[in-house]
Image (spheres, grey):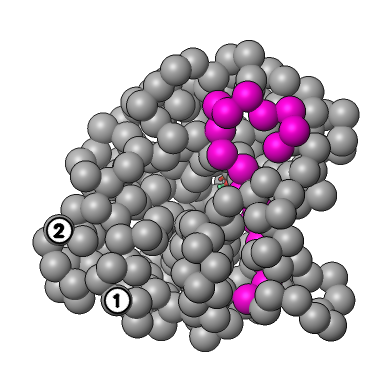
Amino acid sequence: MAQKIVAGNWKMNLEKEEAFDLVNQLNEKIEESTVRVIAFPPSIYVLPISKMSQGKFDLGVQNFYAKSAGAYTGEISIPQVKSVGGSIGLIGHSERREYFQEGNEFLKEKVDAALENSFEFIFCCGEPLEVREVGEELNFVKKQLEESLFHLSAEQMWKAIIAYEPIWAIGTGRTASAEQAEDMHANIRSWVEEKYNEETAKSVTILYGGSCKPENAKELFACPNIDGGLIGGAALKADDFCAIINAF
Ligand code: PGA
C-alpha cells in the first residue's frame, strides 16, 4: 500500500518570526492521523524548526545538490541537510526546472545521490499549459520519469515518492479537475507497473500538487490513485494546511 502524505512546500516565503509562528500553530493544530505530514521550509529554517518540532511532521528541503561536499558556492548537500534534522528533499520542482534550468539528466544525479545517502525524496513532474493544450501531457510526463527515475531498480523504486504537479495549476488558483489528476496518476502508476511490477506500482506514493486547497482536497484525495498532496500556497496558513490533512 502506498503511504498517504500531505506535504507543505513553503517556497521562498515567510521571514523567521512568521515561519516560527506557523510551526507553533502546526504543533498545536495537527491532530493524530494516519497521514504522514512533511514540511519543506526554506532550508535556513530547518535547524531551528527541528528543535521546535514535536514530532508531528517530518522536515525536508526544497532543493539540494548531488555532491556531498566541496567548492559548490551557494549549494547545500544531503549530509548537511541530515545533520540539521532534514530527512527528505524535493527534486525537480517545476520552479527549479524553469527558473534554474534543472534538466532531467541533472535531476537524475540528485535521485542517485539521495538513494546513495539514504535520503528520502519527492520527485516532481508535470507539464506546462502549452503541452496540455496539444494533448501531449502523457508523453511529456512519461519522458520526465523515464529520464530521471526509471533507471532505478525495483527495490530503489519502492523508496521513491512522485508528485504530479501540472505547471498550469501551480499558484494559479486553477486546479486540475479530479478526473484530470486521477487520469495522470493512473497513467503514472501503470508506467511503474510496466517498467517494474504490480507490487511496486501499488507501493509507490503519487501526490497531487497545484492549487490544492481545503475546498478541493477531499475530492482529489478520494481518487484511487491520488495518495495525498504537495501543497504550496495553502501550506502557509496552518488552518488551511490542517484542513487539507483532515481531508483524508
Ligand atoms: P500551489 O503550489 O499549491 O501554490 O499551487 C504547489 C507546489 O508548487 O508545490
Please state the horizontal and vertical placement of residue 133, each as a whole percent of the image. Answer: 39, 66
Type of amino acid under label 2: Glu
On screen, residue 35 versus residue 47, left or right, reads left
* Gap in angstroms between the C-alphas marked 1 and 2: 13 Å
| Residue wearing tag 2 | 199
Q: Is residue 155 above or below residue 229?
A: below
Between 110 and 190, the one lying in front of the other is 110
Tell me the quarter of the image containing the C terminus. Answer: top left
Q: Residues within 10 Å of mark 1 (few under 14, many from 20)?
A: few
Q: Residue at x 72, y 20 (%)?
A: 24
Q: Residue at x 41, y 82 (%)?
A: 147
Q: Residue furthest left?
A: 198
Q: Position of residue 142 (x, y in %)?
A: 32, 74
Tell me, yes or no, whether the highlighted magenta stretch contains residue 195: no
Q: Is residue 223 left or right of residue 161?
A: left
Q: Amino acid at mark 1?
A: Ser
The residue shown at (31%, 30%) is 219
Most extreme residue toward the bottom is: 105
**Snapshot quadrant of residue 237:** top right
**Which segment is the magenta one?**
50-66
104 or 120, which lies in front?
Answer: 120
The circle on residue 153 is: 1
Q: Is residue 65 magenta?
A: yes
